[in-house]
Image (cartoon, grey):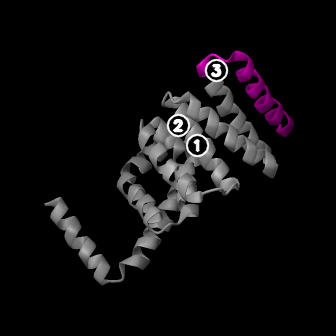
Amino acid sequence: MLETMRTFAAAKLEEEGGASVRRRHAMHFAELARASEPGLVGPDAASWTARLEAAAADLDIALQWADENADADLGLEMSSALWRWWLISGRLAFGRSWLGKFLAGAGDRRDERTGRAFGSAAVLAAENGDYGEALRQARLALGIFESLGLRERVAFAATVLGSAHRYLGDRDDARRSFQTAMDLRGRAG
């Protein structure tokens, strides 16, 4: 019954100018994704987790819209913002898939959006046991952030890189990466 209703609603949506409605829907859920990133580490983390769980289908539809409409910027922003939720909810493969799609669509771009996506993908790869890929993606993120002078982002990428090295047992490389992150964060106060 739900599938029949979904099919009927989709047909009615197309009749009513669905492209505009779908875009607005994607923008709304992109904003939710962006707002969730800091929310998931604050005192309201439990309520943010519940909000994202309730919106899971809509977030997926918004990501699909970004993919189908080749909106790499929206896809990169959303998938970069959702990494922590995908991590804590056990959706590592799901998140890695979306990040991989949007990074592939970004091509050779090396801006803050792609850096954030590489950093997010590196976290999920490391936590998914794909340490070689985590190293590759964290190094890409680190290079992008260093070239842009984004110190806090460099510290994040260095932390992810250090974690991947630690998982691989490369203590010296892990120590160097963690020290870089600590030095940057120390200078930032």
Q: Which mark is residue 166?
A: 3
Q: Position of residue 169 (x, y in %)?
A: 63, 16
Q: Is residue 154 left or right of residue 63?
A: right
Q: Is residue 181 left or right of residue 82?
A: right
Disc 3 residue type (three-letter): Arg
Q: Earlier in the sequence, mark 3 or mark 1?
A: 1
Q: Which mark is residue 189?
A: none
Q: Label 2, label 1: how many angstroms apart (C-alpha)?
A: 6 Å
In this orientation, does residue 19 appear? Answer: yes
User: Which secondary structure lies at badge 2?
Assistant: helix
Residue 184 magenta: yes
Q: Residue type at mark 1?
A: Ser
Q: Are marks 2 and 1 in contact (CB under 8 Å)?
A: yes
Instruction: State the separation of the CA atoms marked 3 and 2.
Output: 15 Å
| Residue at horizontal 79 percent and vertical 26 percent from the top | 179
* Residue that protrudes farthest toward the bottom in the picture: 16
SS of the residue under disc 3:
helix
Q: Which residue is under mark 1?
A: 120
Relative image position of residue 167 (x, y in whole percent): 59, 21
Q: Position of residue 129 (x, y in %)?
A: 50, 27
What is the three-letter code of the residue carrying label 2? Leu
Residue drawn at x 55%, y 31% is: 126
Q: Which residue is mark 2?
A: 124
Secondary structure mostly seen in the magenta stretch: helix
Residue at far front of view: 108
Query: Spatial distance from mark 3 to mark 1, Cα to Cα?
Result: 18 Å
